[in-house]
Each structure stands twice: as structure tokens, then as C-alpha cells.
Image: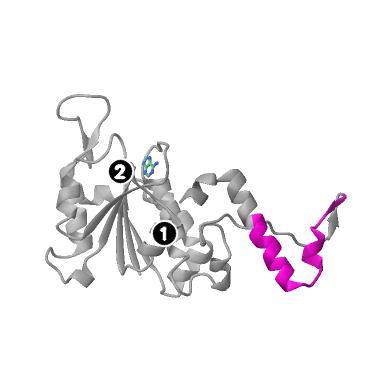
Amino acid sequence: MRIDVVSIFPSYFDGLTLSLLGRAQSTGILDLQVHDLRDWTHDRHRTVDDTPYGGGAGMVMKPEPWGLALDQLAGLPGAEPAARPTVIFPSPAGEVFRQSTARELAEREHLIFGCGRYEGIDERVFEEAATLGEVRLISLGDYVLNGGEVAVMAMVEAIGRLIPGVVGNPESLVEESHEDGLLEYPSYTKPSIWRDREVPPILLSGNHGAIAAWRREQQLERTRRRRPDLLDR
Ligand code: ADE
């Protein structure tokens, strides 16, 4: 998979060279490229923002650098549908990012993430991007960040670990929170007694059927208590 990220703070993404995603890049499973939006400006100050038409607080990202960046990264308009990228703009006004979103996006060949700052990006950029590929505005949750970078870090990690070969043991992707719509069961390791706290005896019983049933019950109980909204869905 190819992922391009456009940001005015490219060094935010240095962390994505570590750990599993770092290895996926060295082995060629993932081609992740981070770009500085200012490389597509042409004035002395490398300006990416301007005052909003109609007035109001804050600044808006200018369309021109975004247009040039997307043209270059997405290839030509009218390209074969399979070669078209999915263009994602993180936004608190977008659809909420879920595990199902990560699963869907992990199937794509090419993702482009555009990180907005200030009060947002000139709306025409989204219309223009839609001529190059599918456009998705995606929110990490119902709170506001200073810009899209942290949201893109989270999305790239959630999507990247679902690409076949990125996580060494694919079994571990099945038994985790949200994969089956429930929260994960609790985990324990040695010692079996720590500070007078015992591991639930069923886990030491060797009875695999009983252990699986207990874990399922724990999943349901936790989900009921912490995230009843998941059960409604
Ligand atoms: N940018 C600012 N807030 C955001 C959020 N909650 N999700 C995605 N992008 C954002």
C-alpha cells in the first residue's frame, strides 16, 4: 500500500518509522511518504493560509498549495478507477473513524491524507480532490484537536497494522477490542499471585472450553459496563 501524508508539520510523523510500521516500510509492504505542504507554495514566505471571506476568527488554508500537492500525488484526473487514490481529510466535522473504517481503508492501494490546520481548508479543495479520487472527511471523535496530524497518526497506525504481513501473528488481530464489536477480555501473565492478587483460577485450569466461555462472558460484561452503546449497535 502507498500512503502519502501532506502536512505543514511533517516531523510529527517521525514516530511512524518506529516499531511495526517502521519494519513494514523497510520490508516494502508499506510505502509511506510524508510531504511538507509548503513545498507547493511559490512566494517568499511559503504562505499556506489567509483570512476568511465573510470575516470571522482565525485563518483558512489557501487552496493553491493543496491543489498542486493533490495533482502531483494523485496523478492525472480521469485515471483508471483502480489507480485512483482515496483522499482523506481528518476533520472534527467528518464521519467517525471506527475499526470498520480501518478495515475498509486497509484494502485500498493508495491513500492520501491531507492535514488541515487553523480554521480548516478552503472548501473548494474538497470538491477538487473529488475529481481525483474518493474523498472522505473523517473524525477521530467528538473533540477538537489543533490540527489533523495526531488524527492521521492514529488512522495510519490503525489501518497499517491491518495490512497483511505488518503484524507478525495475524491471530492477535482477531482477538482484540472492536474486532467482533465487543471490548477485549482481561489478560494476565506470571506470577499467578502478585501482591496478594490472584489470577482468576479458571485461567490455570487447562480447560480450554471453560476458558473460552469465561473470556466471552468477560467481554460481554465489560462492554455492558463501559460501552453499552456498542451493544445497541
Ligand atoms: N482535527 C481537529 N479535530 C479533529 C478530530 N477530532 N478528528 C480528526 N481531525 C481533527
**Mark pair 1, 2: CA separation:** 24 Å
Q: Amino acid at mark 2?
A: Gly
Q: Residue at x 38, y 66 (%)?
A: 106
Tell whether position 199 is magenta. Answer: yes
209 w.r.t. 72: above or below = below
Residue 100 tag number? 1
Q: Residue at x 80, y 58 (%)?
A: 199
Tell whether position 180 is magenta. Answer: no
What's drawn in magenta, residue-wise? 196-218
Identify the coloring. one colour
Image-based side of 194 in relation to 17, left or right: right
Q: Is residue 190 visible?
A: no
The image quadrant of residue 25 is bottom left
Image-based side of 2 in relation to 80, left or right: right
Tell which of 131 and 224 is nearer to you.
224
Q: Tag 2, which secondary structure?
A: loop
Q: Nearer the viewer, mark 1 or mark 2?
A: 1
Q: Return the x and y of residue 162 as percentages of the image width and height.
A: 46, 67
38 w.r.t. 206: above or below = above
Image-based side of 176 in relation to 146, left or right: right
Q: Report the predominant secondary structure element of the magenta stretch.
A: helix
